[in-house]
Image (cartoon, rainbow, N blue to C red):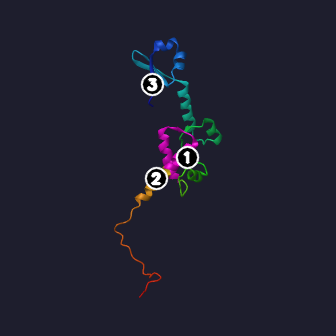
Amino acid sequence: MKILVSKNITLDLFCKNPIQIVETENNGTIAISKNKKTLFYVITPKVLKNLFDIEKYSLKNETTKKEKKVIEKFPMYSNWIPDKDFIQKAALWGISLSEEVSKYELASFISYWEAEGLFFHHIQWQQKLARSLERSRSMNLIKQKRDITDIPVPDQKTPDGFRGK
C-alpha cells in the first residue's frame, strides 16, 4: 500500500505536542522520523474515516438502501447492483438501452471501478453504468462489419406493376 505523506516531522517535535500536530494537519498522513528514517505514520481522523468507509463497503454483504443514504457516497464494491428500474432511469438520462444489463457487463463495470477506488452516489454509479453500456454496445455494432466475400443472391419475385416471364 502506498502512503501519501502530507507532512514530515521529527519524533522530538511530535512528542512535544502530538494532539496539536494531528489537529492542524488537514491533508492526510504525517510521517514521524528520527535520523532521517521514518519510524511510523500518523493518520488524521478524516483519512481514517475514509479508510473505514472503504472497508465497510468492501464487505461481501449487500448494503441496504438505508445505509446508502446514511453514507451517501461510496466506492464500488463487488455486490453492487443497479436499481430494478435501471433501464427506465437510463431513458430519463437520455440513454436508450434495449436490453437489461448482463452479468458479464456488470462484472466488467464493477471490476474496473473497484480498482479505481473513487467515491460516488448510487445514482452516479448507475449513470456511469448506463454510459458505459451505451458506449460498449455501440462499439459492438460497429465491429459487426459486412462480409466482403459474401455474394448476394437476388430474389426471384417480380414486384407488382412489372411484367414477369
Q: Is residue 103 magenta?
A: yes
Q: Residue at x 54, y 57 (%)?
A: 99
Taking the spot 52% from the left edge, 19% from the top edge, the residue there is 24
Label 3, on which residue?
5
Tell me how far mark 2 sits from mark 1, CA to CA: 15 Å
Q: Quadrant of the C terminus?
A: bottom left
Please report contact status of discs 3 and 1: CB closer than 8 Å, yes or no. Answer: no
Q: Secondary structure at mark 3?
A: strand
Q: Is residue 62 above or below residue 35?
A: below
**Region rendered in magenta:** 102-131
Examine the image and state in which quarter residue 155 appears: bottom left
Residue closest to the far bottom:
165
Q: Which residue is mark 1?
A: 126
Which residue position is annotated with label 2? 136
Identify which residue is drawn at 42% across, 58% down.
142
Q: Is residue 147 above or below residue 43?
A: below
Q: Secondary structure at mark 2?
A: helix
- Mark 2 or mark 1: name the one nearer the start of the chain: 1
Q: Report the residue that reaches farthest toward the front.
A: 161
Residue kind at label 3, given as amino acid type: Val
Check if mark 2's residue and mark 1's residue have beta carbons within 8 Å.
Answer: no
* Residue 120 part of the magenta segment: yes
In percent of width and height, residue 154 lies at: 40, 77
> Sequence-wise, which precedes: disc 3 or disc 1?
3
Q: Is residue 156 left or right of residue 19?
A: left
Q: Dot 1 lies on which element?
A: helix
Quarter assignment of residue 141? bottom left
Q: Position of residue 26 (x, y in %)?
A: 51, 23
Amino acid at pointer 1: Gln
